Image (cartoon, grey):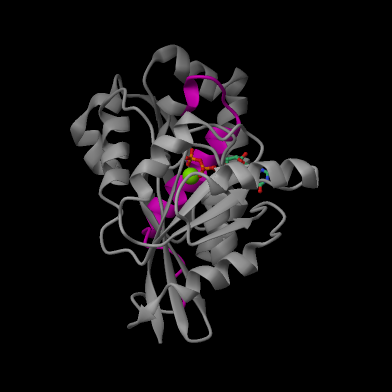
Amino acid sequence: MKSGFVAVAGRPNVGKSTLVNALCGGKVAIVSDKPQTTRRRIFGIANGDGYQLVLADLPGFQRPRDALTERMQRTVDSAFEDVEGVLFVLSARERIGAGDRFIAQRVFSFGVPVVIALNKVDRLKPGHVATQMDTASKLGDFHALHPVSAKTGDGVAELRDELVELLADGPAYFPPEQRSDLSREEEIGELIREKALALTREELPHAISVEVEEIDEKVVRASVYVETESQKQIVVGKGGSIVKDIGTRARPEIEALVGHQVFLELVVKVRPRWRRDEATLDRLGV
Ligand SMILES: Nc1nc2c(ncn2[C@@H]2O[C@H](COP(=O)(O)OP(=O)(O)OP(=O)(O)O)[C@@H](O)[C@H]2O)c(=O)[nH]1
Ligand SMILES: [Mg+2]
């Protein structure tokens, strides 16, 4: 049996979580088109013939602005101990620049193999991909470089094989049926947050958090927190239309998770400055 941990590093929004999901063959982490979607470390578990690869999906590297983002960056800073390697994710759709070089300085200093995934190569011209691969290859002394599309799955199997090569003899850390280290409540809270992120824009997505209060046979009760009354009005929507939409989108995925129909009760609440409140952040597990 081969096993071990690989940390997933990169700028916000490059597709780290989408790639972790693709590598694990199912949804582990939520995804959105807004940066700073991932707020805490999530282990995504990929089991295969004679191996267990545990991917540590992480928030993107960022400059902290408040207690929330400070904690997120601390999570990133402490995630590279005891890993067999680092998966350094870049977006081929953006200029590879100072932000990536800053992260490269860190990840190439840990003394473990760095595998670069040049993500989002779907629908890019081969010449452009080649140029981006050339730029990526100059970031540091990488172990391997894979062009991939987490979205279409192109190159993902080859990347997985590469990461499995880094594993050492060891035990399975998680039971084979387990796909992540999130609790049921956390998984459901994240699904609801994903739908709320999809329906909001600009600063609002960053001000949203979700807490699941109760899960029983028939009912899931959860609160969607924002920081101000005007944000609440937006998330509730005209006649409750937005919060209803969040629920409609989240419910099928929650039902697939728990294996039966549920009634989803969502309430939007204001909790001023929760992003700066350590007790709230403790409760959210960030
Ligand atoms: N075209 C394309 N889009 C992708 C690909 N992978 C991810 N995306 C999109 O990129 C956006 C960000 O994806 P995430 O997986 O949330 O990115 P992340 O790096 O985890 O972001 P943070 O958690 O905020 O740091 C989403 O809109 C994804 O759909 C890809 O291979 N191709
Ligand atoms: Mg993410």
Which segment did they paint magenta? Answer: 177-205
Instruction: State yes or no: residue 284 in magenta.
Output: no
Q: Residue furthest top?
A: 230
Q: Is residue 271 left or right of residue 48?
A: left
Count of numbered labels shown in the rendering? 0
| Quadrant, the N terminus | bottom left
Question: Which residue sits at x=71%, y=47%?
Answer: 130
Residue 222 against residue 53 in the figure, above or below: above
Residue 75 against residue 252 in the figure, above or below: above
Question: Which residue sits at x=46%, y=20%?
Answer: 232
Q: Is residue 70 left or right of residue 50?
A: left
Is residue 254 or residue 168 the one in the foreground? Answer: 168
Whole-percent x and y of residue 147?
65, 54
Residue 272 against residue 211 in the figure, above or below: above
Q: Is residue 240 visible?
A: yes
Residue 163 against residue 79 in the figure, above or below: below
Whole-percent x and y of residue 270?
36, 22
Quadrant of residue 141 within the rendered picture: bottom left
Q: Is residue 124 left or right of residue 24?
A: right
Q: Which residue lies furthest to the left in this view?
A: 279
Instruction: State yes or no: residue 184 in magenta.
Output: yes
Whole-percent x and y of residue 211?
36, 41
Whole-percent x and y of residue 210?
40, 38
Question: Which residue sits at x=38%, y=53%?
Answer: 185
Q: In this view, does 251 lie to the left or right of 182?
A: right
